[in-house]
Image (cartoon, rainbow, N blue to C red):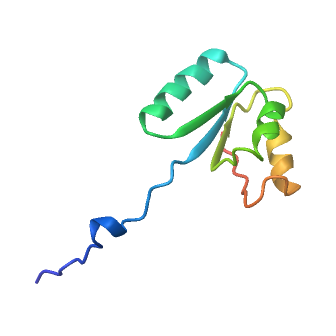
Amino acid sequence: MSEAMTLPPLGEAPAKRTPTVYFIDDSATMREVIKIAFRRENINVITCADAASALAQFEQNRPDVVITDVIMPIRTAIPSAAKSSRIPNTATHRSC
């Protein structure tokens, strides 16, 4: 038995939104490698050398995802900001 799938007309397809990823790392080489890889996948990447400069940009360009180097100085700035509601609708996930 087969099921028919109804697709909306082409004119009604919702526009895809390009996600914004912040990549925060003190290594310029890592920032450049990640920027190239993500942009190939059509993802908007904003790279920052430290958490303070990323936080300063969050209001103009709200992140969908924030990726940080766990061995950076002031590495607690991002989780602290999320907890203080400075970044609305943000959940914190830590991974090793």
> Quarter of the image containing the N terminus?
bottom left
Residue furthest out toward the front: 11
User: Can you give x and y, in whole percent of width and height, for residue 90 in the image?
Assistant: 73, 56
> Quarter of the image containing the C terminus?
top right
Identify whether 95 is placed above or below 69. below
Would residue 60 be found to the left or right of residue 77 on screen? left
Which is more toward the observer, 85 or 61? 61
Residue drawn at (73%, 33%) of the image: 70
Residue furthest out toward the top: 29
User: Can you give x and y, in whole percent of width and height, for residue 13 in the image?
Assistant: 36, 65
Residue furthest out toward the left: 1
Rendered image quadrant of residue 84: bottom right
Count of numbered circles in the view: 0
User: Can you give x and y, in whole percent of width and height, for residue 51 in the image?
Assistant: 80, 33
User: Can you give x and y, in whole percent of width and height, for residue 14 in the image?
Assistant: 42, 64
Residue drawn at (67%, 47%) of the image: 63
Identify whether 62 is placed above or below 11. above
Rendered image quadrant of residue 11: bottom left
Identify whether 68 is placed above or below 60. above
Residue drawn at (73%, 61%) of the image: 89
Residue furthest out toward the right: 84
Would residue 41 be found to the left or right of residue 28 on screen? left
